[in-house]
Amino acid sequence: MSKLIYVLNGPNLNLLGKRQPEIYGTEALSDVEQNCKSLLVDDYEIFMGQSNHEGQLIDWIHEARDKACGIVINPAAFTHTSVAILDALNAFEGPVIEVHISNVHKRESFRHHSYVSLRADGVIAGLGTEGYEAALRRIISLTRS
Ligand code: DHK
């Protein structure tokens, strides 16, 4: 089995660390990538992707069908709007963990609904950027043989 895990990030997360730090913290996405890499075991690897474009995220999810054993995804605002990302994830067979840096349930009501949660095997919200590490650990424990 592949030991590659896709860690996908949606719109505006390229500004992580600079954008609304009171909500999203001060770590950049590059810090998140380093933290994730530091907990890899065995032959596990990650591909870290961020896009502001729904179609690019969908293309990566399709690519993951052949290449990856699991997906960690923070779809950002597309969480609340994208049936297309849900459909793409439904075509992926491995575990999917949905991550939100902030506690979306403590925020505006439009952030309370997630299309992606209809597919996700686990959902993490409000752990800050540590949520990515928790999600990665879970994918590894589900796929390690
Ligand atoms: C990130 C975003 O950009 C928002 O659109 C979501 C999510 C929440 C987060 O907490 O990581 O509503």
Image (cartoon, grey):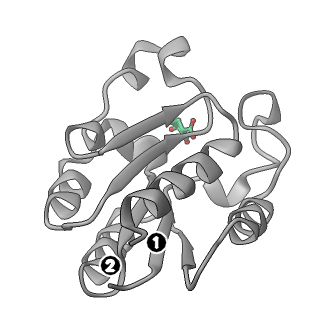
How packed mark 1 is, by other alpha carbons closer than 10 Å (few <14, some 14-19, many 20 or more), is: many
**Residue located 80% across and 38% down the image:** 25
Percent across and percent down for residue 114 are: 31, 33
1 and 2 marks in contact (CB < 8 Å): yes
Q: Nearer the viewer, residue 3 or 17?
A: 3
* Residue at the extreme front of the image, as rendered: 145
Q: Which quadrant is home to the N terminus?
A: bottom left
C-alpha gap between disc 1 and disc 2:
7 Å
- Residue 38, disc: none
Where is mark 2, residue-wise?
A: 64
Q: Is residue 128 left or right of residue 79?
A: right
Where is mark 1, residue-wise?
A: 6
Q: Is residue 103 left or right of residue 19?
A: left
**Residue located 46% across and 81% down the image:** 4
Percent across and percent down for residue 142 are: 38, 58
Ligand 1 contact, mark 1 (Cβ < 8 Å): no
Percent across and percent down for residue 34 are: 77, 69
**Residue located 50% across and 35% down the image:** 124
Can you tell me which quadrant of the image ligand 1 is in?
top right
| Residue type (three-letter) at the residue carrying disc 1 | Tyr
| Residue type (three-letter) at the residue carrying disc 2 | Ala
